Image (spheres, coloured by chain):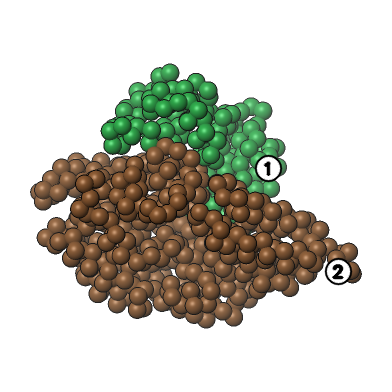
């Protein structure tokens, strides 16, 4: 398996950043960056990461199952993550999540039929003082109202 | 642009560059005292640096509040093994959103703090473990590292002093548990984030079995000011044994939620009413989560206190990570307790049975209660199950789930009685 030149460059640097013989340390960062390019943690990707880090594929597989941001199935092109943890809960996070479900017509960890959007109710993402918060892919949005979320989603639909 | 307006009541030490134009650039940093502390520390012995940090009364800003100077002194400098520094930027304690700002607005202050720690424990390599959700910060930090390398503030012979240090970022991928220091180390080594048996402590055998110094982003970020202005000056900002300032993340039912830098020992009610602009819609205060969701909640009548580690400990809670969540009188405590428990049940790594099963049982009972099936005996059962988790797990996650739950059912039992199932009320 090969990746884009940029990602290959990142991986070369990454593997060299740990002490010699400790390449296994690159497993988690390698998986998350590769997932962004491949679209999901596929069996081939697990084999490839295992080969590059010098460990058995099973040792990579058990890591995949642990981390909530690693997905074996492809997400939507835009992954909408709505926080409902305590700080968001107090200022409308739950209502925002319910609104997102209706707006997108999907539930927790589901993907729209056209593959454009996926939705996830997430745990605290570190935006508590600017709640309620939404992260779309890796972009943070603060003080999100249902109207603002509609605008964000409609804007992304148009961009497509 | 800042995420929230600063308050005139702040004492800005670690956040002093927040809001400056190009605050994240090395030039801005150098123009505002940057790397002076490192050069000063280079002229000091490791013992002198550690003594200065001890004198500052700085305590860990990640949540546990352990004295930082003492932690630095535990790392064996004479070990034949190389020392490693690990920076915990896995900020995920609900209510906490400050390390984000320290990396975003002042990454070179963090770098300088790490270099000072490197001098103190004779380490030459460091890893900043940043949660996966903070991808933009990983790229931002990488850019700051590249700038520091290109200008000779990282790498070989830093600023001509003969000191070498290599610093890297490392991405997490979504796991609250990895904020626990030994789980973080396992994650850094490419494994599931499962806490380790202690001892040995990371200072002796941490990352890859090497002596490891592990602190929170804010803790390292305070080091330059401590060395530059002296430990005593930093300590004097706070209360005895509770030195300096800290970033307090105020969220919930207030008019001006935000991250504010306040001295240790700042009055809690003043933080709510003046710094954060008072309660929203003129409602009454009901409760405060003083330092992240793991802390026992305070009733409104308990909040007339000074915010420092020892005062909070005295009234049975914690200052924690600085995540202060303010709840008004309209808050449904059953829903609040349930949301906390859903979080811990989701994040329990499953290693220890009392935590794995306990959080799940508690979540189920609270869910039933919230859905209208609450039985009178459930109220006592919630407390009993929680108490049985305390102290019976490898790491603090079990306690973190139990402590707020105990405080909620003890202090807000009436809220649960009001939500009993109809048949339980008449029974």
* Residue at the far front in the pictured view: B199
Question: Of helix, strand and loop, which one carries label 2?
Answer: helix
Residue in the image at 36% along x and 70% along y: B245
Which mark's residue is nearer the viewer, 1 or 2? 2
Residue B135: x percent and y percent? 43, 42
**Chain A appears what colour?**
green
Frontmost residue, B321 versus B203: B203
Q: Which residue is mark 1?
A: A101
Name the image quarter holding the N terminus of chain A: top left
Frontmost residue, B98 versus B87: B87
Residue A21: x percent and y percent? 31, 32
Left or right: residue B176 compared with residue B8:
right
Residue B353 appears in view:
yes
Frontmost residue, B113 versus B384: B384
Residue B420: x percent and y percent? 80, 65
Residue A140 appears in view:
no
Chain ID of residue with mark 1? A
Left or right: residue B106 compared with residue A57:
left
Residue B175: x percent and y percent? 51, 45
On the same chain, marks 1 and 2? The answer is no
Residue in the image at 18% along x and 57% along y: B38
Q: Which residue is mark 2?
A: B425
**Chain B appears what colour?**
brown
- Reply above or below: B57 against B163: below
Chain ID of residue with mark 2? B
Residue in the image at 46% along x and 57% along y: B97
């Amino acid at each position: 398996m090969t990746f884009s030149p940029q990602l290959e460059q990142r991986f070369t640097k990454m593997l060299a950043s740990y002490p010699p013989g400790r390449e296994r340390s690159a497993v988690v960062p390698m998986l998350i960056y590769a997932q962004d390019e491949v679209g999901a943690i596929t069996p081939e990707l697990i084999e490839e990461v295992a080969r590059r880090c010098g460990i058995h594929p099973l040792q990579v597989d058990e890591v995949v199952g642990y981390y909530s941001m690693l997905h074996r199935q492809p997400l939507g092109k835009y992954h909408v993550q709505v926080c409902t943890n305590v700080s968001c809960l107090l200022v409308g996070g739950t209502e925002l999540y319910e609104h997102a479900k209706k707006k997108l017509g999907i539930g927790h960890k589901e993907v729209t039929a056209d593959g454009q959007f996926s939705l996830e109710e997430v745990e605290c993402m570190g935006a508590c003082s600017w709640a309620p918060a939404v992260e779309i892919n890796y972009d943070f949005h603060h003080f999100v109202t249902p109207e603002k979320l509609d605008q964000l989603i409609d804007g992304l639909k148009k961009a497509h | 642009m800042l995420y929230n307006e600063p308050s005139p009541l702040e004492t800005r030490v670690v956040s002093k560059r927040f809001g400056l134009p190009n605050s994240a650039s090395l030039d801005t940093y150098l123009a505002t005292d940057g790397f002076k502390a490192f050069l000063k520390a280079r002229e000091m012995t490791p013992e002198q640096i550690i003594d200065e940090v001890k004198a500052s009364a700085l305590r860990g800003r990640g949540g546990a509040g352990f004295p930082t100077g003492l932690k630095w002194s535990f790392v064996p400098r004479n070990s034949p093994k190389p020392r490693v520094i690990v920076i915990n930027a896995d900020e995920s304690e609900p209510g906490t959103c400050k390390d984000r700002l320290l990396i975003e607005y002042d990454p070179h202050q963090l770098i300088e703090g790490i270099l000072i720690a490197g001098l103190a424990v004779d380490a030459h390599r460091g890893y900043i473990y940043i949660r996966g959700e903070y991808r933009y910060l990983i790229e931002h930090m990488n850019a700051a590292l590249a700038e520091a390398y290109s200008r000779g503030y990282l790498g070989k012979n830093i600023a001509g002093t003969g000191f070498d240090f290599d610093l890297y970022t490392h991405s997490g991928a979504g796991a609250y548990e990895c904020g626990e220091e030994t789980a973080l180390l396992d994650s850094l080594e490419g494994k599931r984030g499962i806490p380790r048996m202690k001892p040995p402590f990371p200072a002796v055998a941490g990352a890859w079995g090497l002596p490891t110094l592990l602190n929170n982003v804010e803790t390292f970020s305070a080091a330059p000011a401590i060395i530059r202005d002296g430990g005593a000056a930093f300590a004097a900002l706070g209360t005895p044994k509770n030195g300096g300032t800290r970033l307090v993340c105020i969220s919930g039912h207030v008019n001006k939620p935000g991250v504010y830098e306040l001295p240790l020992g700042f009055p809690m009610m003043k933080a709510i009413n003046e710094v954060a602009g008072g309660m929203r819609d003129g409602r009454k205060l009901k409760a405060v989560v003083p330092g992240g969701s793991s802390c026992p909640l305070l009733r409104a009548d308990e909040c007339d206190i000074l915010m420092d580690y020892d005062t909070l400990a005295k009234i049975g809670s914690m200052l924690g990570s600085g995540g202060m969540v303010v709840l008004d009188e309209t808050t449904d405590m059953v829903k609040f307790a349930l949301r906390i428990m859903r979080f811990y049940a989701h994040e329990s790594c499953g290693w220890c049975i009392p935590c794995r099963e306990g959080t799940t049982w508690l979540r189920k009972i609270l869910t039933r209660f919230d859905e209208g099936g609450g039985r009178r005996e459930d109220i006592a059962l919630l407390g009993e199950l929680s108490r049985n988790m305390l102290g019976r797990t490898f790491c603090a996650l079990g306690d973190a789930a139990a402590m707020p739950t105990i405080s909620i059912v003890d202090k807000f039992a009436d809220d649960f009685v009001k939500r009993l199932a109809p048949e339980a009320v008449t029974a």
